[in-house]
């Protein structure tokens, strides 16, 4: 399968239509504008308007159920095997590979003109018993052999591989997750990426994780630092997957777009890989809209996949987190997602919409580091920079910056939209976060 989806196209046609619609409405007497003209009547068609894909997880044992395949085929153009390409499924006994169910999903996808995300080559979870019992250099070799064999089997048929899944700990440490793979040495992640590149050179290679949606979380910063380091050292990596499993304990963060744009600024694609949002009705619909709008605001956010077709297919079925109910009816969340993909999207924009700020780390010394900030979307702006505990401002350039610790505020000083600050670490080496508003 050739990779036909590259960077999203600008939405020129749609913008013209929206403007015409808006003008017509205004001329007709100032009635509030409704949503933009629906350019796509399915999720995949609407996403394709901006060059993006819209996908779902698929379970092989449901491919014989026509109610399921009818929706899956109509709405989605990217498929992820929910469990069938995991290590326990593909290598149940060491060096005995079983691709039966993975192949069923790939052939269903290909015969229906869909692309496939490969999930996942190296993970602490869903390991077969033999691997769980291994350690040290034997495990390292077995892991690399697994990556090589599976990526070779599917070579040329995978749009993007989740090469490594969930390698960082939750909480405030920013540390790697303790696992048998981690205990083979800190370089296990890059070794897996190098093996994947060698085996399937045309697939995009992603690092995928959850709880990496909130830019202020230590885990997000840790993944960001991993990707930055890989890019700096030439370790092959093309994309970051944000699983984006949301619920009351883990809501859609207000800085989600900042997270997406910050990863993208490292020179990788961002894919929303396992989206589900627990809830119902308007609140759930609104959260889906926010996620879609955040992705659409960043050109390198190239696609969104939900983690299942109907609520009853979900791994978190009791939270009704998907776009179709158990009977296959479209939920309010479906409509808000479709409208947002079509560039409409009713409701208030997220805080920060109107301009976007990207934060990237620059020079570093033992006691301080530089941060470059780039604003897009407006030439008038106010950027609110949240420094991390203990950090203080040493210096700034190309903007007027007030405050010395905690929240700093930056406004234009006539030097354009790119500015920078130097922060003293005072023991805290994490990146600040920033949001942009148009005053
Ligand atoms: C889940 C599947 O949906 C379940 O069927 C299975 O029992 C457990 O795994 N993060 C991931 C996915 O990367 O592989 C997980 O999928 C959900 C969390």
Image (cartoon, helix red, strand yellow):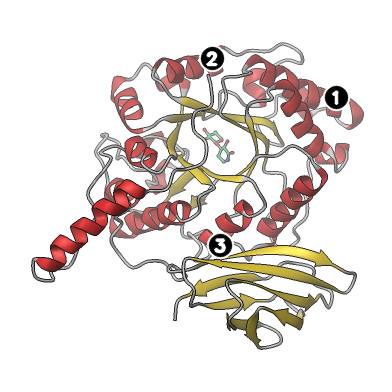
Q: Do the residues labelled 1 and 2 touch (CB within 8 Å)?
A: no
Dot 3 alpha-carbon crowd within 10 angstroms: few under 14, some 14 to 19, many 20 or more:
many
Q: Which quadrant of the view contains residue 142?
A: top right
Picture residue at 30% right of the left edge, 20% below the top: 66
Going by the picture, which residue comes out furthest to the bottom? Answer: 403
**Looking at the picture, how far across and down is residue 287, in whole percent?**
39, 57
**Image vertical order of residue 84 relative to residue 314, above or below:** above
Q: In this view, does 135 lie to the left or right of 301?
A: right
The residue depicted at 22 percent of the width and 49 percent of the height is: 37
Side (left or right) of 21 relative to 104: left
Q: Nearer the viewer, residue 84 or 424?
A: 424
Q: Earlier in the sequence, mark 1 or mark 2?
A: 2
Q: In which quarter of the image is ligand 1?
A: top right
The answer for how far apart the CA atoms under marks 3 and 2 are is 37 Å
Closer to the chain start, of discs 3 and 2, is: 2
Q: Name the residue under label 3.
A: 258
**Secondary structure type for disc 2:** helix
Q: Mark 1 points at which residue?
A: 141
Image position of 356 with respect to 295: above or below:
below
| Crowd tier of the residue under label 2, counting other residues whose Cα lies within 10 Å: few below 14, some 14–19, many 20 or above | some
User: Which x, y percent locates residue 48?
Assistant: 38, 38
Can you identify the residue that label 2 sits on? 103
Q: Is residue 177 visible?
A: no
SS under mark 1:
helix
Q: Does the residue labelled 2 lie within 8 Å of ligand 1?
A: no
In which quadrant is the C terminus drawn? bottom left
Q: Quadrant of residue 346?
A: bottom left
Front-lying residue, 257 or 170? 257
Disc 3 vs disc 2: which is toward the camera?
Answer: 3
Q: Which of 180 and 355 is in front in this view?
A: 355
């Amino acid at each position: 399968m050739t990779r036909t989806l590259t960077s999203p196209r600008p939405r020129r046609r749609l913008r013209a239509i929206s403007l015409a619609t808006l003008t017509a409405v205004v001329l007709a007497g100032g009635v509030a504008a409704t949503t933009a003209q629906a350019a796509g009547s399915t999720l995949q068609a609407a996403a394709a308007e901006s060059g993006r894909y819209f996908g779902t997880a698929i379970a092989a044992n449901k491919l014989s159920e026509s109610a399921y395949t009818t929706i899956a085929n109509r709405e989605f153009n990217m498929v992820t095997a929910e469990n069938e390409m995991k290590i326990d499924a593909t290598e149940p006994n060491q060096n005995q590979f079983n691709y039966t169910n993975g192949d069923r999903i790939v052939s269903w996808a290909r015969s229906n003109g869909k692309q496939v995300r490969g999930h996942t080559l190296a993970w602490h979870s869903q390991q077969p018993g033999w691997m769980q019992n291994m350690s040290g250099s034997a495990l390292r070799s077995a892991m690399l052999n697994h990556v090589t064999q599976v990526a070779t089997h599917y070579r040329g048929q995978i749009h993007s591989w989740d090469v490594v899944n969930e390698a960082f700990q939750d909480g405030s440490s920013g540390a790697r997750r303790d696992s048998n793979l981690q205990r083979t040495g800190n370089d296990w992640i890059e070794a897996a990426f190098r093996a994947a590149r060698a085996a399937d050179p045309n697939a995009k290679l992603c690092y995928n994780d959850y709880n990496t949606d909130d830019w202020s979380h230590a885990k997000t910063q840790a993944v960001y630092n991993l990707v930055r380091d890989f890019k700096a050292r030439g370790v092959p990596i093309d994309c970051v997957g944000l699983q984006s499993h949301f619920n009351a304990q883990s809501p859609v963060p207000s800085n989600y777009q900042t997270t997406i744009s910050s990863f993208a600024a490292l020179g990788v694609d961002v894919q929303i890989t396992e989206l589900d949002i627990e809830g119902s009705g308007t609140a759930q619909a609104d959260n889906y809209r926010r996620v879609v709008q955040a992705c659409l605001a960043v050109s390198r956010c190239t696609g969104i996949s939900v983690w299942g077709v109907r609520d009853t297919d979900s791994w978190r079925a009791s939270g009704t987190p998907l776009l179709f109910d158990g009977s296959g009816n479209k939920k309010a969340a479906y409509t808000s997602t479709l409208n947002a993909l079509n560039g409409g999207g009713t409701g208030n924009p997220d805080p920060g919409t109107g301009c976007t700020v990207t934060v990237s780390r620059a020079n570093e010394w033992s006691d301080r580091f530089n941060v470059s900030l780039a604003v897009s979307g407006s030439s008038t702006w106010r950027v609110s920079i949240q420094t991390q505990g203990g950090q203080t401002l040493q210096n700034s350039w190309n903007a007027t910056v007030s405050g010395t610790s905690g929240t700093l505020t930056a406004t234009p000083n006539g030097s354009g939209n790119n500015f920078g600050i130097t922060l003293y670490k005072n023991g805290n080496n994490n990146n600040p976060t920033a949001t942009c508003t148009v005053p």
